[in-house]
Amino acid sequence: MWDTVLEILEETLHHGLLTLPFLFGAYLLLEWIEHRTGEKLRHSLGHAGKYSVPLGAAIGLVPQCGFSVAASNLYAGRLISAGTLLAVFVATSDEAIPVLLANPAGGTKILPLIGLKFAFALLAGYLADLVFFRRKNTAACAHDHCDHDDERDEATHELCKHCGCEGGIFRSALHHTAETFLFLLIVLLVITTATTLIGEEALAKVLLSGSIFSPFLTALIGLIPNCAPSVLISELFVEGTLSLGGAIAGLSSGAGLGIAMLFKINRDKKKNLQILLYLYLFAVFAGILTDLVCKLL
C-alpha cells in the first residue's frame, strides 16, 4: 500500500514540477500583455459600439481574471449590452490556456479550443442581443450611472488584490504561478490516485466522457467562481479523460469571478439570474454540438 502511495506522490510531483517553468513563463508573457494593453482593451470595450460583441469575444480569450470582472462592471454601468457581457463570459477560460501551454501534450489542443471558444462567444453574444436580451442596457440618467462608480472601483480594487495584479509584472506572474501550481498539484493528485486505483476507463465513465450528458456536468462545474474548475477541466482534457465538447462546455460557463462580481454590483438580480441561466444552457449547447461534430468528422 505504501509503495502505491509513494508512487502516486512521485508521479504527481514529477508531472507538476515539469510544468512549473513553462507555467511561470506563460504567466510572465500574459502579465506583460495585460500591463501593456489591458487598460486600453477595457476602455475600448465600453466604446466599441456595434463591434462590442466581437471585441468582447476577443478580449475574453486573454487569460486574465480582470477582463470578465471589467465586463461585469461595464454592464452594471450600462456601458455594454448583455450580449457583449456574455461574449466575454463564454470566451473566458480562466487558467486553461496557461495550464495547456505548460503541458507538452496540450500545445496542439490550444488553437482548436481557442477557435471554438471565439466562435461560440460570437454566437452567444449576438444571439443574446438579437433574441433573448433585446432591450438596450441603457442608464435611466447620468446620476444613476454615477451612483455606482465608487462601488465598481472598490470591487475592481478588491479583484486586483485577489488576483495579485498589484506590485508589478514579475510579482503578479509569481502569484498566479504559485496559485495555479497549487491547484494543479491537487488536481494531478486526484487524477493520478483515481487512475491508479480505479483506472482511466472507470474515471472517464464517472465524468460521463463521450456521453451527451458530459457537457451538463462540466458546465455546472465551470460555474464555480474559482480558477480550480478551469485547471481541473484543462488537465482532464489534456489527459484524454474529457472530450473536447466536455472541455468546451466547462470552460465556456467558467467566467471566473465575473459572475460573482455581476451579482455583487448589478442591482437587477432577476436579469443576473437570466444571464447565469443563459450562460449555463449555452455552454451545454456548445459542448453537445462540439462532440456531435467531432463524432461526424
Image (spheres, rainbow, N blue to C red):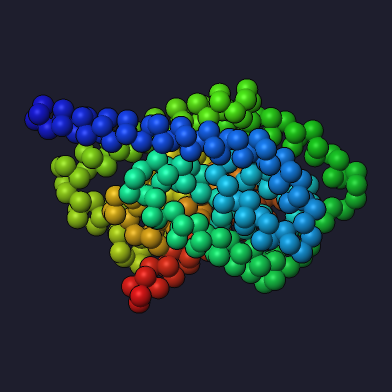
Task: Please say if 264 is above or below 45.
Answer: above
Task: Please say if 164 is above or below 73.
Answer: above
Q: How many marks?
A: 0
Task: Please say if 212 is above or below 9.
Answer: below
Report the residue at 34% width, 60% height from top. 243
Q: Nearer the viewer, residue 205 or 110?
A: 110
Considering every residue shown, the one lying at the far right of the view is 142
Report the residue at 62% width, 25% height from top. 168
Q: Nearer the viewer, residue 114 or 295?
A: 114
Measured as percent of width and height from the top left, residue 15 is found at 28, 36
Report the residue at 40% width, 73% height from top. 293
Considering every residue shown, the one lying at the far bottom of the view is 296
- Residue 117 in sight in this render: yes
Task: Please say if 83 is above or below 13.
Answer: below
Measured as percent of width and height from the top left, residue 200 is found at 20, 51
- Residue 69 in sight in this render: no
Report the residue at 53% width, 30% height from top. 173
Q: Is residue 217 left or right of residue 204?
A: right
Quadrant where the C terminus sits is: bottom left
Q: Nearer the viewer, residue 125 or 297?
A: 297
Q: Is residue 68 left or right of residue 291?
A: right
Measured as percent of width and height from the top left, residue 277 is found at 56, 58
Quadrant where the N terminus sits is: top left
Measured as percent of width and height from the top left, residue 147 is found at 84, 39
